[in-house]
Image (tube, helix red, strand yellow):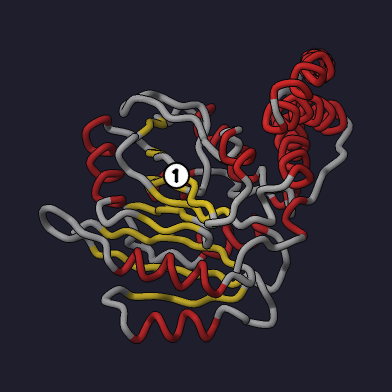
Amino acid sequence: MTRIAVCVTTFRRPQGLARLLRSLDALEFPGERPAVSVIVVDNDRAETASATVQQCSRSSGMEVRYIVEPRRGIPFGRNRGLASLPPETDFVAFVDDDEAVAPDWLARLLDAQRRYRADVVAGPVIPVFERDAPGWAIRGGFFQRPRYASGTQLDVAFTCNVLVRADVIRQMEHSFDVRFELNGADDSHFFRRVARSGRKLVWADDACVREWIPNSRATTKWLLQRAFRTGNGMAMIATDLSDSAWRHVVVVSKSLVWMAIGLAALPVGAVFGKHRLVRAAQYTGYGLGLLLGVFGVQFQEYRRVHGG
């Protein structure tokens, strides 16, 4: 029997965590059902997720383990989950505590893994907005992530929707890098290292999860911060995974190009709507994040919790 552990790192999102656990409990499989367990790592030393996990566990058909990681930071939580894997685990799946999975989500990931003989399978994340979300934030497509044809090979994946062969994790020299403590780029760094090690990463476009977008994220400030953080993390990853000094020059050059594109697009954005104006400002913010990331300046986006 295939054994799968679903790892969730949570921090003060009781409603989102409960929604996720209910969706995991409703998973469906067309053939033999694998043994699915859930590992919830509470990244809050106050153990604020305990009551939610206990309540959901009482009505769940799955094994749900609750673990506390008091050291604040996403990589600490993710690494604690990996350290708690049962030794017989075949696959590890990751999802976030502000998401809910489709009933066939895990079955689709497993099917793609078998079909493409993949070591890592990633899938799409569909945004779900609040009823009174600002229209410009939706029109701008800021929360739409790239999608690909199933089977497309990737050079990176993210823990918002991914399945990993357990032997990949066991053979990695290091797990999630704690230098990205509150930056959120530790998963990009991890899966880029996996790809560089020769492992096969593929896309499964039918293995969907939904992500709830609170209005506190549908703001100009948050979107600009996200663009800055993304560039920041990309620069830190690129320079960390390359021993060449030339890599620093390349990243700095890219940062200047992105900032120039953004500044040039600002007047056009001002004419054609707020969503275009914010997009132009994001280009500039992304470039600035790249530039500062080269010099080790890290933006800690996850100091604040969005959504309940």
Image quadrant containing the C terminus? bottom right
Give me the residue at 30% from left, 50% from top: 105
Of residues 127 and 37, the one drawn nearer to the viewer in this rendering: 127
Give me the residue at 35% from left, 86% from top: 58
Q: From the viewer's perspective, is 301 left or right of 172?
A: right
Of residues 109 and 125, the one drawn nearer to the viewer in this rendering: 125
Give me the residue at 40% from left, 69% from top: 21
Q: Position of residue 130 (x, y in %)?
A: 54, 57
Which residue bears the numbered disc 1?
126
Q: Is residue 159 above or below residue 73?
A: above
Q: Position of residue 245 (x, y in %)?
A: 82, 17
Q: Is residue 82 above or below residue 281?
A: below
Could you tell me how many numbered marks the image carries? 1
Q: Secondary structure at mark 1?
A: strand
Q: Is residue 145 above or below residue 15?
A: above
Of residues 6 and 276, the one drawn nearer to the viewer in this rendering: 276
Q: Residues within 10 Å of mark 1 (few under 14, many from 20)?
A: some
Tag 1: residue type? Answer: Ile
Q: From the viewer's perspective, is 92 left or right of 15?
A: left
Q: From the viewer's perspective, is 252 left or right of 223?
A: right
Give me the residue at 69% from left, 63% from top: 305
Image quadrant containing the N terminus? bottom left
- Outermost residue to the left: 31
Q: Position of residue 135 (x, y in %)?
A: 60, 42
